[in-house]
Amino acid sequence: MAFGPISFITRGPEFDLVIHSGRVIDPDSSLDGIRNVGIRGGRIVAVTAKQIRGTREIDAKGLTVAAGFIDPISHGQNVENDAIQVFDGVTTKLQMESGVEDQDAWHKLQAGNRICNYGAGCGHGTARGQVLGKDHIETQVATHDEIARMAQIIDGQLKKGALGVGFGLEYLPGTTREEVFAMFRVAGKYTASCHPHIRYGTLLEEQHVLTAIEEVVACSVATGAPLHIVHVPSMALGNTALALEFIEAAQRRGADLTCDFYPYTAFGTGIGSEVFADGWQQRFGITYSDLEWAASHERLTAETFAKYRAEGKGMCIAHAIPEKSVQTAVKSTATMVGSDGGLDHGVGHPRSSGTFCRVIGHYSRDLNLIPLPLAIEKCGLRAAKRIEKRCADFRRKGRVQVGADADLIVFDAKTVGDQATFDKPAVKSVGMRYVLIHGQAVVDQGQLRDIRPGRGLRAPLA
């Protein structure tokens, strides 16, 4: 019997990219072990102890592999900030506290122009300004009809896919309880989370942080709108332990409630805002020398404070948060990490550059306040779970699992950490060897690549 020529089929690599032999930490599935991760078409398609091959392979032996971090309160929605935050391990950035004016226009502007993934809510403050005018946005009390018009604006933006509703209540003291309730009621229709900068954050009893928390928790329970309270320590200051005890107790009773923190002992905000209206020294328990002008890093005096406030522009950093409050927030069962950051040509607060790696490096590794898997969970998975009921895309974020988006970080747990300071807020964090967004390495062997793989995230259009 004659046989024809024998042919051999040579199979090429099964995956676009393989990350070999890293310590893979996935808090959602409780995985913490040495694994190989296979990526194809921007998704994770294998997490295995077996040997696998890829067109490109990354040796992660001795390194940690985790899902990219998700910043739920990022004001730096541009490439300048993306290029710094990727070194902090951030792959998805959400503007939830302030929101954006129009979902269609904003997403069109971002498309193809971002390193990180991006998404946004809509803002009560924006709606208030549209109805009352910008000259009256802070202190004017709205009529019932004006409140109804604000609610219509919020409703329209939620129909356009806004991820949630943001509030800046401390900055808008003219906002009545009726107005807050009306905005929560609209959010509840869409099961959209509300992200308030709460009304009070002072040391005074009549403006106590618990009064502010009670207001938004009550609105959430009454309307069914999920609630996320932003940057708790910068509002609660020395009362942070009490505020978090309240939030944790509400969670145990079934409240759909989360909150975030950034790991610094100073908050930063515009000097022209209502935060620095007369009486701020008594409200926050600080004085002029506790204020730092972000542009020059000078400590303020009565004269320079008056000068800058009269000009009405620029960030002032207030050194008012006790370190004990930060550590309490790190350890709290209720919290996730959020930067509240945003640099403008390098000027700003170090939270804009170092928030996530400071939690991983300083508070988890150096101070041993929480284990690394829990720190990773607070930096990513918890934010994904906060938004995923509204936007199903987040079910593929914050996880190292088959089917998840290949938004991944590969870092050295021994050296990872923040480097930014109040004097030099734009210094990048260290320790991130690789940062992948949809399977593309935006940070490759510690170097930033000039690519824009970031994608927009929106809720379904109504």
Image (cartoon, grey):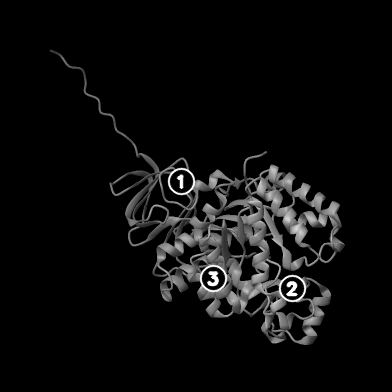
Q: Secondary structure at mark 2?
A: helix
The three-letter code of the residue at mark 1 reads: Ala
On the image, numbered disc 2 is attached to which residue? 275
Pointers 3 and 1 in contact (C-beta within 8 Å): no
Q: Nearer the viewer, residue 295 or 369?
A: 369
Question: In the picture, residue 13 is in which quadrant?
Answer: top left
In the image, is 132 to the left or to the right of 158? right
Mark closest to the chain's N terminus, 1 or 2 = 2
Tally the marks: 3
Q: Secondary structure at mark 1?
A: loop
Residue 184 at what x, y percent from top left? 69, 54
Task: Judge depth for marks 1 and 2 and give the one in front.
Answer: 2
On the image, numbered disc 1 is attached to which residue? 404
Question: In the picture, residue 348 is in which quadrant?
Answer: bottom right
Q: CA distance from mark 3 to mark 1?
A: 34 Å
Q: Is residue 214 above or below residue 106?
A: below
Mark closest to the chain's N terminus, 3 or 1 = 3
Q: CA distance from mark 1 to mark 2?
A: 41 Å
Residue 88 at what x, y percent from top left? 52, 63
The three-letter code of the residue at mark 3 reads: Glu
On the image, numbered disc 3 is attached to which residue? 245
At x 64% / y 71%, what residue is drawn? 210
